[in-house]
Amino acid sequence: HRGRIKVVYIDPPYNTGNALAYKDHGHDHASWLNFMTPRLMLARELMREDGVIFIHLDDGESAWAQLLGHEIFGEDNSLGTLIHQRAKGGGNSPSFVRGHDYVHVWAKVADQAGAFLTEKKAPAKLEIIDGKRMLVETDVLRAGFGRYARGQERRLMYEDILEVKGPKKLAEVDAKLGTGEYVLRPWGPAGKHAVVRVTPAEKASSKLYSIIKALGGQNDLEDLGLGGIFSYPKPVELVKTLVASQTFFDPGAIVLDFFAGSGTTAQAVMAANERDAGSRTFILIQTPEPLQTKNARSLVGADSEDGFPEISRLTAERIRRAAKRHDPELHFTEIAVAEQ
């Protein structure tokens, strides 16, 4: 897979001293950096030239992760930091409510990564046209810029384009009317027509905002009958947003997560595919780290009489259940769990 991965998303073990399954991870900054360095170097080798990596963590190692990322990917390839708003409560905190994490982003080659996109929101609205979900924008042409008086029509009607914008603009609009990108709709009492842009919903995009609100990672697991095992699983909606932002027009991309945990990334890729009928694929890696939670040993449908003795087996089961949720007709021949 060298040079084939479009998106790497990782939520690495936090520096709490509890990640004992990784023998090279001690409980200090230097050990954490030594633990992360070869993994990030390998990630860079696997990434496409236009690939990106999202590193999701709290403030315990955020500053150190930034320095390490600059060293491995190059500071010129840093694309910035996103904020994940993950909570609203926490009023009992001794200092202030900690309601966010950080997602540091690097590209393999910054000028090839492209924009980070998301579905276009209001003021456009969705309509069903000829049986398809279309985004409809009724104010793509305006008579001018600046503030409008209350009740004043700001749209430039088709019949007024020549007078206000000239023949070149009229020819441009006519060309887009010919391709179907624009359509005319009757507008107002004067018998004129507004120029309306229609875009298939799955192709209608806006730039991603740097603050992403996504709650409820625990609910995602509970919906699959796997709740109460992880204290803070990442929300599917968050990872789907990140994955889709760099694969909006690349629905066949490969996504890698080499700290798979509960398997959120797999379900997020499925959700991204469901949005646009894409064929994105995922590679998840998780060491057979023992699961200490009592709940993990009594789950219905567990893969052994002892429940899920290791995180990797629970990861595989979450993938099975999520896949069946997205496609009830899906049948598995085998999901292999490779041992180290």
Image (spheres, rainbow, N blue to C red):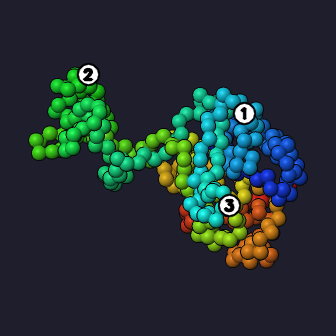
Where 166 sits versus 45, above or below?
above
Graded by Cα atoms within 10 Å as few (under 14), some (14 to 19) or many (20 or more), the crowding at tag 3 reads few
Left or right of 199: which side holds 7?
right
| Image marks 2 and 3: residues in contact by CB distance under 8 Å | no
Q: Residue at x 86, y 57 (%)?
A: 20
Residue 319, picture quadrant: bottom right
Location of the C terminus by quadrant is bottom right
Instruction: Name the mark on residue 301.
Output: none
Which residue type carries mark 1? His
Judge whether residue 330 can be spotted in this image.
no
Graded by Cα atoms within 10 Å as few (under 14), some (14 to 19) or many (20 or more), the crowding at tag 1 reads some
Left or right of 141: which side holds 339?
right
Cα distance in 3D space between marks 3 and 1 = 33 Å
Mark 2 or mark 3: name the one nearer the start of the chain. Answer: 3
Where 271 sits versus 305, above or below?
above
- Residue 196: horizontal and vertical position, in percent? 27, 41
Location of the N terminus by quadrant is top right
Count up the numbered dots. Answer: 3
Residue 81, picture quadrant: top right
Which residue type carries mark 2? Lys
Judge whether residue 160 can be spotted in this image.
yes
Graded by Cα atoms within 10 Å as few (under 14), some (14 to 19) or many (20 or more), the crowding at tag 2 reads few
Cα distance in 3D space between marks 2 and 3 = 64 Å
Q: Residue at x 34, y 47 (%)?
A: 123
Which residue is denoted by mark 2 in the rendering? Answer: 168
Which residue is denoted by mark 1 in the rendering? Answer: 70
- Residue 294: horizontal and vertical position, in percent? 77, 75
Q: Nearer the viewer, residue 316 or 235?
A: 235
Which residue is denoted by mark 3 in the rendering? Answer: 94
